[in-house]
Image (cartoon, grey):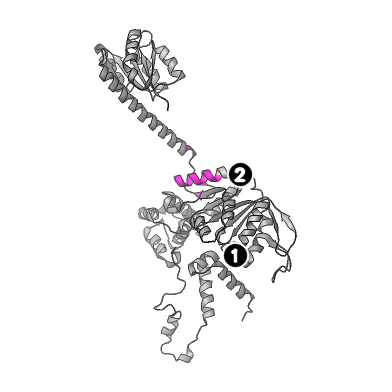
Amino acid sequence: MNKSRILFVDDERLILSSLKRITSKLDVDIVTAESGALALEILAKQPVDVIVSDMKMPEMDGIQLFEQVAKLYPETVRIVLTGCDDMSMVLSAINQGRVWGYLQKPWDNNELIITLKQALELQQILAERTLMRRTIDQFQQYRKTNFEGFIGDSVPMQFVYSCIEQCSSSNASVFITGPSGSGKEVAAQAIHRLSKRNKENFIALNCAAIPSELMESEVFGHIKGAFSGAVSNREGAATLADGGSLFLDEIGEMDINLQAKLLRFIQTGQFQRVGSGKVEQVDIRFISATNRNPHTAIAEHKLREDLFYRLNVISIFLPPLCERGHDSIQLAEHFLSHYSQIEGKDFAGFSSMGEKLISDHPWPGNVRQLQNIIHSAVVMSEGPLISDVILKQQLTDPFHSASSLSVLPKKTSPYDVHADVRVQANNISQTDIEIISLEKVERHAIEQAILVCQDNIVKAASELGVSPSTLYRKIQQWQTEPTE
């Protein structure tokens, strides 16, 4: 660490020698100058922490010197060395901020040492404050309020934006983690758009939404007759993403056996379509994501360790909305403007209590939950302000709950699906009541969940407590069944 520097300025060499001798025990570098002009030359080469100058000097007196120092080196602490007859000028200079303090001639050696130590401490505080101010100014200058599909200027998101910018120019694989609804696919798309591959395709595969038996075909494609239902050749994500980027969302949900084939594909860029013996070569940048702790997934044998380390060259973590400070308000205002236009309504904003509710709510479903709540509030409110009352109504709606989704009415028994029918039919004979099969009840529940979740199969499966592949199999089964 560099030592602090003190500059003594006086036109009498004897005084300079005396000051240098007295302060020799301080752990600082001592510099002397016999005139104000020479002092400015020294400062131009290397600024000092504290400058102590005589008041009366030829050509340039102490006050004139300090005017220049205050202008050019404001962080330097300035002390006047003066006689009693100069006190009115010194006090005037102190009031104008040109000097911090003064020492009277003849000085007391102990007082001199104490004053210099205090001045050095003050200079350190001033330097730290200046550095902090510069850092804040630089942050404000480069702070982004929105970035490639993201909204928010919080510090955690500034770091995310910086990571995306830095890794975009590379071809290295990127592994994105973060809770559901935090914007992992938005980040993947941003990386692709900012990369040299942006002229080619960005292909996204949700590994949790595709049945395991179809996943290999989705990734690598297949040829006609490779399996039952393969009525024609089909290109997979590997072919479509050639030259571009392949985003593998929820990579930990991919079948563990297929992960081995994926690892070899990543290592070599070579693959074979299902049912084909022809080896194809592609050039792909891989971007992966998961909402789970990857190390936990590895321990549970859901994710191959070697595959993870192959994909995890660059790591990006997307923070939950509750850790993004004021971003929730900025996002809410963005969604309000967006959905107001879509729904043909005019809103001035949120009430003060509405803003407080948005700021204080933990948003377990993150940005996705906030987006849906604001959309619903726009539809259900006439404005001109979105109040906390309408927001609370949407948040307490079971269809917007992040923890549970009740598709069917809640009755006294979990098996009492048709209680309403039976209540209305109390006075009707048992032979008049239609008994609905469990298969139809199940189909109705699944179809209602998909409808409520706006055709998001993964979300519907999550809310129903089953795997996405289960829903896909059910849907495929219904599509092949003859219509009644």
Label 2 crowd bin: few (<14), some (14–19), many (20+), radius 10 Å = some
Look at mark 1 in the image and give the residue it sits on: 210
User: Where residue 444 sits in the image (x, y, percent)?
Assistant: 52, 75
Please state which of residues 359 and 428 is positioned toward the viewer in this rendering. Answer: 359
Q: Say which element carries label 2.
A: loop
- 127 relative to 260 in the view: left or right: left
Whole-number angstrom distance, CA of label 1 to CA of label 2: 29 Å
Tell me the kind of residue under disc 2: Ser
Is 480 placed above or below 89 here? Answer: below
Quadrant housing residue 137: top left
- Please say if 312 is above or below 437: above
The residue that appears at 46% across and 36% down in the rendered structure is: 138
**Horizontal side of residue 89 vs 470, given as left or right:** left
Question: Is residue 438 within the magenta segment?
Answer: no
Q: Quadrant of residue 263?
A: bottom right
* Dots 1, 2 in contact, CB < 8 A: no
Which quadrant holds the N terminus? top left
Query: What range of the chain is rendered magenta?
Result: 140-164
**Which numbered disc covers residue 86?**
none
Which residue is at 69% across, 71% downward?
229
For label 2, the residue is 170
Mark positioned earlier in the residue sequence (1 or 2): 2
Q: Residues within 10 Å of mark 1 (few under 14, many from 20)?
A: many
Q: Which of the two residues, 26 or 204, is positioned nearer the viewer here? A: 26
Circle 1 — which element?
loop
Magenta stretch contains residue 142:
yes
